[in-house]
Amino acid sequence: MFVVQDILKTKGNEVWSIAPDTPVGEALKLMTEHNVGALLVTEGERPVGVFSERDLARGLVGYGDFSLNTPVSTLMTSPVITVTPTTTIEACMEMMTDKRIRHLPVLKEGNLVGIISIGDVVKGMLRHKDNTIRHLEDYISGTGYGH
């Protein structure tokens, strides 16, 4: 079974976070510096939202008085939907599709241990499927089995 922990082994556990009162302009600068599409919004250690490129696009269209000084809390996606390291990739895909979200913070025993994106999930699923196909081909052809 392929789970979130398998993605984090490849991707790593780094998470960039900001406070709810962080201005949008500052958040965008941080996203650019670290080449990420979303930031976790936290109060202390507790995740309270996710601010993403998608939230910015919605803000540009939906808020007449929007500026780069607008706090991210105005635009962030909340409440935060989280997963654990043992959540299956299929379950992640289902959550992301049903909730129309692209990022899932990963919590282990209440502690933040990473964040995964829809891109991470798709890449992980493809890698897992490729491995399964290779193992089946080896089994069918008799190579690799018992050697």
Image (spheres, rainbow, N blue to C red):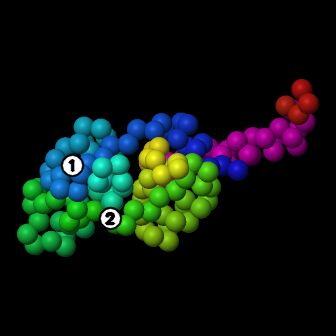
Name which residue lies at 18% across and 52% down: 22
* SS category of the residue bearing label 1: helix
* Above/below status of 78 relative to 27: below
Residue 25 visible in image: yes
Q: Residue flagged by tag 1: what amino acid is it?
A: Ala
Q: Residue 58: x and y, percent?
A: 25, 67
Magenta: main secondary structure equals helix
Left or right side of 128 for 113: left
Q: Residue 41: x and y, percent?
A: 30, 54
Q: Residues within 10 Å of mark 1 (few under 14, many from 20)?
A: many
Q: Residue 70: x and y, percent?
A: 13, 60
Q: Residue flagged by tag 2: what amino acid is it?
A: Thr
Magenta-tinted stretch: 118-143
Name which residue lies at 88% across and 34% down: 145
* SS category of the residue bearing label 2: loop
Left or right side of 77 for 146: right
Q: Can you say which quadrant of the picture contains the C terminus?
A: top right
Marker disc for residue 27: 1
- Quadrant for residue 78, please give it: bottom left
Q: Residues within 10 Å of mark 2 (few under 14, many from 20)?
A: some
* Above/below status of 102 relative to 144: below
Q: Residue at label 2?
A: 77
Real-space Cα separation, disc 1 to disc 2, in angstroms: 14 Å
